[in-house]
Amino acid sequence: MTVYEHPGDPGTDVFDAVVLAGGAARRLGGTDKPAVRVGGRALLDRVLRACAAAGTTVVVSDPRPTARPVLWAREEPSGGGPLAALDAGLRHTTAPYVVVLSADLPFLDEKTVRRLLDALRADEGTADGVLVTDPDGRDQPLVAAHRAEALRRELARLAVEHDGLTGLPLRRLTAALRLTRITDPLASFDCDTWDDIAAARARIREHGHVLDEWISAVKDELGIDLDVDITELLDLARDAAHSVARPAAPLTTFLIGYAAAKAGGGPEAVTEAARKASALALRWADETTPEAGPGALPEAAPAAQPHPGPGAGQDTGPAAG
């Protein structure tokens, strides 16, 4: 078991994440829901990317391959319900704030996680947690951020009152906490049925989303945490394709990545390499225009004709004679 440690982002020691991934998925016919793929990535991996800035990420489930290393936990007995699972995951956390998520949120992103935490910090002393509501105003308790101390306190109280947490619904916990709410219709979308899965798969292929989804999937697949300006790279590819030749676009973007890696990596290295290559492509194009200016090469002379050899001018083809 390994703990994912985010590489040095501000605030990585402020919150941990607990992802509940052990449900029965009855409406999916018992399918292993966290492993169902949307946009080429398992639902669980999509959620893990959203909480990548956590100091410790705990997944409450049987262990499985994931794109990011996590710490695995399991409630006792297995299948004891969401409160028992949350308690099992919480035991492995140490941060003052805990993000609590389900493993079936295809559109959850880091921005929503930050919104939850920012709202919780803004309500310091007045709120135990912040959760997301869906478009109908219903609470989504598995898209939430909490003060860890408040969670532990109420879970302990419920365990005493009910002789354990097995089988208790989440509403027993949320009813006891002081909660504020934010609205995020997209982040609150969860996949309970195959129709939900189909809708999620269709949405990410829409024109306005497909490129971001693809780039995110590739970064997960390659283990890259680098955030770069996609527009900048697309502009470079366009300049290379139009100013040089169409195959120059993918080859140039490959060379940009190679150059950035040699320079130590990071968004700044990518930006600088892209700037240089884009300027080169524009200079390349300038040389082919009639307004190339002083120093432009003169118009090419006609190709020299070969010196006529013996028998030049004579018909020596098959029909000769």
Image (spheres, rainbow, N blue to C red):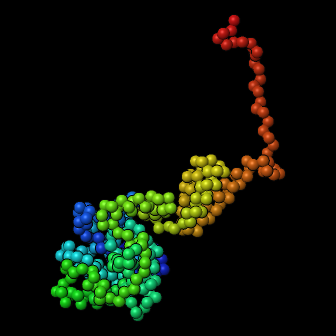
Q: Quadrant of the N terminus?
A: bottom left
Identity of the residue drawn at 64% across and 50% down: 242
Identity of the residue drawn at 43% across and 61% down: 203
Identity of the residue drawn at 62% across and 65% down: 272
Number of disc labels: 0
Q: Quadrant of the C terminus?
A: top right
Q: Vertical placement of 297 versus 128: above or below?
A: above
Identity of the residue drawn at 41% across and 68% down: 107
Q: Quadrant of residue 2?
A: bottom left
Residue 19 rendering spot, x and y as whole percentages: 32, 74
Looking at the picture, tell me which residue is in the foreground, 297 or 41: 41
Q: Quadrant of residue 67?
A: bottom left
Residue that sits furthest to the front in the current view: 136
Residue 35 rendering spot, x and y as whole percentages: 31, 62
Q: Vertical placement of 219 versus 79: above or below?
A: above
Residue 61 rendering spot, x and y as whole percentages: 26, 71
Residue that sits furthest to the bottom in the current view: 125
Residue that sits furthest to the right in the current view: 294
Looking at the picture, tell me which residue is in the foreground, 52 or 316: 52
Residue 49 visible (yes or no): no
Side of 302 relative to 103 (left or right): right
Residue that sits furthest to the top in the current view: 321
Residue 124 rendering spot, x and y as whole percentages: 43, 91
Side of 221 relative to 262 (left or right): left
Q: Vertical placement of 55 versus 36: above or below?
A: below
Residue 30 visible (yes or no): yes
